[in-house]
Image (cartoon, rainbow, N blue to C red):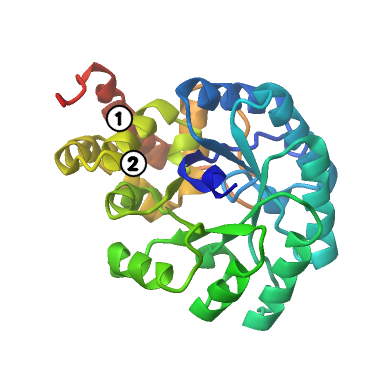
Amino acid sequence: MSSRFHGLSAFPLTPADENGRVDVEALSRLIERLDAAGVDSIGLLGSTGSYAYLSREERLRAVQAAVECLSGRRTLMVGAGALRTDQSLALAQDAEKAGANALLLAPVSYTPLTQEEAYHHFAAVAGSTALPLCAYNNPSTTHFTFGEELLVKLAYIPTILSVKMPLPADLHIKAELERLRSRLRDDFAIGYSGDWGCADAVLQGADSWYSVIGGLLPAPTQRLYTAAKAGDKAEVQRLQAFFDPLWTLYKSLGSYRVTYAAANLLSLTHHQPPLPIMPLGVSDTQRVEEALAKLAELDALPAATP
């Protein structure tokens, strides 16, 4: 079952109106693009998918729409993060009943969690369904960082099979992978988010790339992932040059806002992020348009010769 957490996992937006009602038609169009591009899995209701801003009812509607759209062709991993453990239990069970294949769980908190509190939260959610689970280590939004001892403890829970890691500050990913793998189960998958460094993470041996841009532009992202998976450093470097303007915007403005702007520029949705998150202004939107134009040049770029 850990194979569900390998490869390119694409995280789409969850288009919704100003009242938080999910636009299932727009969501289905986004998911159809991911399916057609052949991504390995779809991460529904991750941070890019606005899970923290949606009600339980709307999150269920999103899962049901995705399940119907995919008809079992791709692994569907669904976020179950919430402030309260009982809420996460309910969300996990909703996702399982609706037909999801895996869960993604972040330690959401207002009062900062201790390592022990996070462990019991994860253990409770993992024990509430039969679905395999990926632990979501996203300190930039949750303000909680998984200690290494916590990861080791979580790996003893049979259905927790993966962790979604942030890029290490020093970008010494290979060293981190070697250290973690020496302590975790052999079948425990380690993947990364932070799109600008994930091709390098795959080159250095990461099992998966959890991708924001893959949820919007799956074809060029799949091309970059394939080169990294093949160990083709020269091709990765060549392709990265087309992504670099977008990576700069992700790092300076936040991938959430930039992806919404990009989706609107591409007419994939006309919804805006939920308030109080504001859409980008005119000048920044122009920068996003320029970054998309650079990325579109990849369409005319021939594939590297094997």
**Label 1: which residue?**
295
Q: Which mark is residue 68?
A: none
Residue located farthest toward the top when viewing the structure as drawn = 300
The tag earlier along the polypeptide, 1 or 2, is 2
Tell me, yes or no, whether the two marked residues, 1 and 2, touch with CB atoms within 8 Å: yes
- Tag count in the figure? 2
Residue 177: quadrant of the picture: bottom left
Q: Amino acid at mark 2?
A: Leu
Q: Is residue 183 visible?
A: yes
Residue 31: quadrant of the picture: top right
Residue 263 placement (x, y as % from top left): 50, 30
Q: Is residue 25 visible?
A: no
Q: Which mark is residue 246?
A: 2
Residue located farthest toward the front when viewing the structure as drawn = 186
In which quadrant of the rendered image does the C terminus lie?
top left
Residue 302 placement (x, y as % from top left): 19, 19
Depth order, front residue of 108/127:
127
Is 218 rendered above or below residue 151? Answer: above
Is 132 rendered above or below residue 214? Answer: below
Residue 288 placement (x, y as % from top left): 38, 36
Depth order, front residue of 180/64:
180
* Image point (50%, 20%), residue name: 36
Crowding near the residue tagged with mark 2, few <14, some 14–19, many ≥20 C-alpha atoms within 10 Å? many
Q: Amino acid at mark 1?
A: Leu
Depth order, front residue of 38/258:
38
